[in-house]
Amino acid sequence: MELQALPSRIGQVRRIVSAQLRYWHLDPLIDPAALAVTELLTNVHRHAEPDKQCTVEIVLMLDRLTVSVRDHDPRLPCVPECDPMATRGRGLALVASVSQSWGMHARDDGSGKVVWFTLAVPQPAAP
């Protein structure tokens, strides 16, 4: 989905991601996915130049869910050492803590970057 990363839109995307995960019966992934996508979109809102336009993509594979956020700013985010009690600057640390893996890369054509995270899909219990 394409959107402008404004605070009101970030909440809407969080609800859309949660609803999609409910539809896929992946309720255990709702909280970590909602938190991580909120952090990534907040970073776009606070830091992306020249605009706040971005695209959120959700991909479900057999064993993992990948959520990515692409924006038009080619500058990669830095992950500062931060105080765990700080009220700002912990976004990517939070993404790292709730996800199985995460990363970022500049787009090959120089038109921006992609920041992504994965979550392990819970396997059904054996009968």
Image (cartoon, rainbow, N blue to C red):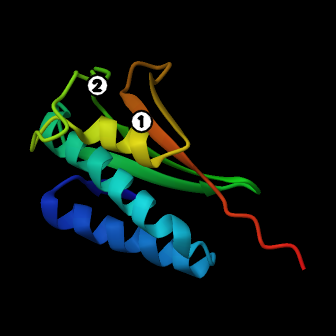
Out of 3 and 23, give the one closest to the viewer. Answer: 23
Determine which residue is flagged by label 1. 115
What residue type is disc 1 on? Val
Question: Pointer 1: residues within 10 angstroms few (<14), some, or many (20+)?
Answer: many
Question: Pointer 2: residues within 10 angstroms few (<14), some, or many (20+)?
Answer: some
The quarter holding residue 110 reads top left
Taking the spot 46% from the left edge, 20% from the top edge, the residue there is 109
Quarter of the picture holding the N terminus:
bottom left
Determine which residue is flagged by label 2. 77
Instruction: Give the image location of residue 46, x and y in percent.
Output: 13, 40
Taking the spot 41% from the left edge, 38% from the top edge, the residue there is 96
Q: Secondary structure at mark 1?
A: strand
Taking the spot 24% from the left edge, 68% from the top edge, the residue there is 11
Q: Are marks 2 and 1 in contact (CB under 8 Å)?
A: yes
Instruction: Give the image location of residue 72, x and y in percent.
Output: 31, 33
The quarter holding residue 65 reads bottom right
Quarter of the picture holding the C terminus:
bottom right
Please give left or right for residue 30 compared with residue 9 in the image. Answer: right
Q: Earlier in the sequence, mark 2 or mark 1?
A: 2
Q: Secondary structure at mark 2?
A: loop
Q: Residue furthest left?
A: 87
